Amino acid sequence: MESQVLERKSSTIMSKTLIKKARLITASDDTRADLLIDGEKIAAIGMDIDARTADVVIDATDKLLLPGGIDNHTHLDMPFGGTVSSDDFFTGHRAALFGGTTSHVDFCIQPKGHTLRRSLEMWRAKADGKAAMDYGFHVAITDLTDAVMEEIRDLPSMGVTSIKLFMAYKGALQVDDTTLFKCMRVAKESGVLTMVHAENGDAIDILIKDALAAGHTTPDWHERTRPPELEAEATNRAIALARAAGDAPLFIVHVTNEEALNAISRARARGQRTYGETCVQYFYFTRNNLNGSRNDPFEGAKWVCSPPFREHNDQVALLRGIRLGDLMIVSTDHCPFNYKTQKILGAESFAAIPNGVPGIEDRLVMLWNAAVLTGHISPSKFVELTATNPAKMFGLYPRKGTLSVGSDADIVIWDPVVRHTVSAATSHMNIDYNLYEGMQVTGKAEKVFLRGSLVVDGTSWQGTRGGGRFMARASALLA
């Protein structure tokens, strides 16, 4: 049964909402309680809160109450490979909210020759007037001059406490080890977290050239030229450089395979401040998906992303990683490109296929089905992976990422039993396909609140274009 609005006072401006009889899930607790929203904040949590204190009362019997999800790895309105990712800061936000994600941290990629401050100004302009949920930025450094090195020290004053370095995409985004090591040292001194895309771009570049010279052009060669050994090597190298940089905090993004995960596990076991994330799609698909279908071999382009999909044994390892805590976050790396008009740019060469897959709307439900309903993790661990750990790692806790008095009222009423089919036809992402097309799933965000305002009510959009805010972030709460 859908959660019911029991009472609505029409004579006042609605500023207080009481959610009653819910099962509240946080990273540490799983309990029955009522929750009162006052304005933008959570005002009270307890049993039998008086309904007369609220303007709106919602009966959430048999529903779960979750903190809004935080997706710390997205690429909205991002130029790549001669095109631009298809979701902007409105369509991507609306889709995320329908899926139960209420804030995110996107990547501001420094154009060559630009300062970090100017780069941030450019990316914030992309969100101005469009943002429908709260957002922040990491800065991806591609052009490290002495002046830019000094700017890293100033990033916290700009509300940014994380940088990203690409060890792949030679000739475009890739940085060398000198740049990586220098950035790690300055970032550590400045309270800034270093994130890395760990693949050996030099070796990959050779493999791509060899494949194309041999006439291999189909999407499956994207994976063949980015083998798991090169992700594992780069992961090990980044960990070693961070250790040599005085144990600089290091966050490895989108881990896909067991060997790379084992490198993170070993580093953490010896006390090194190394953290890992994976993405929800890696629990579902393997390298075989890049082969396409009998009717359309190029359809494998839909699954082209970097690092690529791996094997079933890697999926098993990733599930173990999130259960044991060596992988602390499950994100999306949402970077959508339409199949018919953008992925098709690589019809003659896999190397020209825009890298990226959609998923910002599907993250919570697909992780719920892959890990909670299968018994790998508890609902509290689910909240930890999708909301609390991202908030702590990226300087938003306890404002975001939890259900506690004084926190922002970013809240999801989650129906844990409703069944539905995932489809591009019912999705809100600005893309012409869905990776999970036709999959039957259980669970769904029924109502979503952003800072106390109801923005999603079932299938109804109640949010506001331009209603999202930039989130200035503190330094990570590392554990």
Image (cartoon, grey):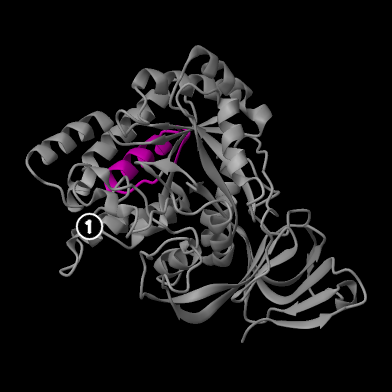
Q: Is residue 478 visible?
A: no
**Vertical comparison of 464 with 356: above or below:** below
Residue 118 in the magenta stretch? The answer is: no
Task: Please give the range of residues in magenta.
Answer: 254-275
User: Is residue 113 toward the left or the right of residue 227 in the image?
Assistant: right
| Relative side of 158 to 268, left or right | right
What residue sits 22% from the left and 39% below the top?
A: 229
Give 403 or 177, whichever is nearer the viewer: 177
Q: Is residue 362 left or right of residue 105?
A: left
Measured along the vertical axis of the image, is residue 434 above or below residue 389? below
| Tag 1: amino acid | Leu
Return the residue found at the far left. 214
Which percent across, then down, holds residue 339? 33, 59
Which image quadrant is residue 105 in? top right
Quadrant of the image containing the N terminus: bottom right
Q: Residue furthest top?
A: 146
Camera-nearest residue between 423 and 465: 465
The residue to which callout 1 is attached is 290
Position of the C terminus by quadrant: top right
Q: Element under label 1?
A: helix
Q: Where does the image place residue 59, in percent across and percent down from the top left?
A: 73, 81
Q: How many marks?
A: 1
State the image coordinates of residue 63 (x, y, percent, origin top left).
62, 77
- Residue at 60% across, 26% down: 117
